[in-house]
Image (cartoon, rainbow, N blue to C red):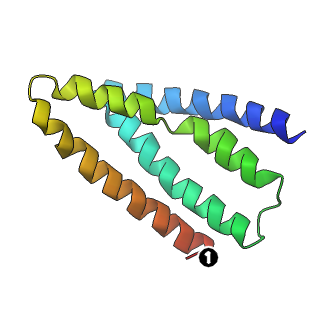
């Protein structure tokens, strides 16, 4: 039953990611949507992990929300491709995207865990 729920949540997360990314990328420069979903996902996963570790989320919902919904909502591979494509003319400039977004993602995951009571 957990496997089916993770699969269904994964499908929902992937659809949500596409909708958010497409909507933001039409209004901002390409790649904004991917950055937003990755940062939001890092924060939300921090909350889910902390609540799960504290026993405030049932053992069924931890994997469904974490691996299923949020695992498919965030997208590391798309972020890497967009970073390379945007930095192609200036090969060294990809660090200006990777470092700040990585640090922001870690900070948001930590804040999410704080909110969830796990840090």
* Viewer-nearest residue: 13 or 119: 119
From the top left corner, tell me how far across and down residue 99 is, in percent: 25, 50
Residue displayed at 39% across by 64% down = 107
User: Which type of secondary structure does the marked residue at label 1 adopt?
Assistant: loop
Evaluate whether residue 91 shows in this view: yes
Question: Circle 1 sits on which residue?
Answer: 117
Residue displayed at 44% across by 36% down = 76
Q: Residue furthest right?
A: 1
* Viewer-nearest residue: 65 or 23: 65
Q: Is residue 82 left or right of residue 37?
A: left
Residue displayed at 48% across by 61% down = 109
Q: Quarter of the image containing the C terminus?
A: bottom right
Q: Residue furthest front?
A: 92
Q: Is residue 21 left or right of residue 80?
A: right
Q: Quarter of the image containing the N terminus?
A: top right
Q: Is residue 37 above or below residue 102?
A: above
């Amino acid at each position: 039953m957990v496997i089916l729920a993770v699969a269904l949540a994964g499908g929902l997360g992937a659809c949500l990611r596409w909708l958010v990314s497409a909507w933001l990328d039409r209004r901002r420069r390409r790649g904004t949507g991917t950055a937003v979903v990755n940062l939001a996902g890092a924060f939300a996963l921090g909350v889910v992990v902390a609540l799960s570790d504290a026993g405030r989320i049932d053992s069924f919902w931890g994997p469904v929300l974490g691996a299923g919904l949020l695992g498919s909502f965030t997208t590391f591979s798309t972020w890497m491709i967009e970073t390379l494509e945007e930095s192609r003319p200036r090969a060294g400039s990809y660090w200006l995207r990777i470092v700040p977004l990585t640090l922001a993602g870690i900070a948001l995951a930590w804040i999410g865990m704080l909110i969830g009571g796990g840090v």
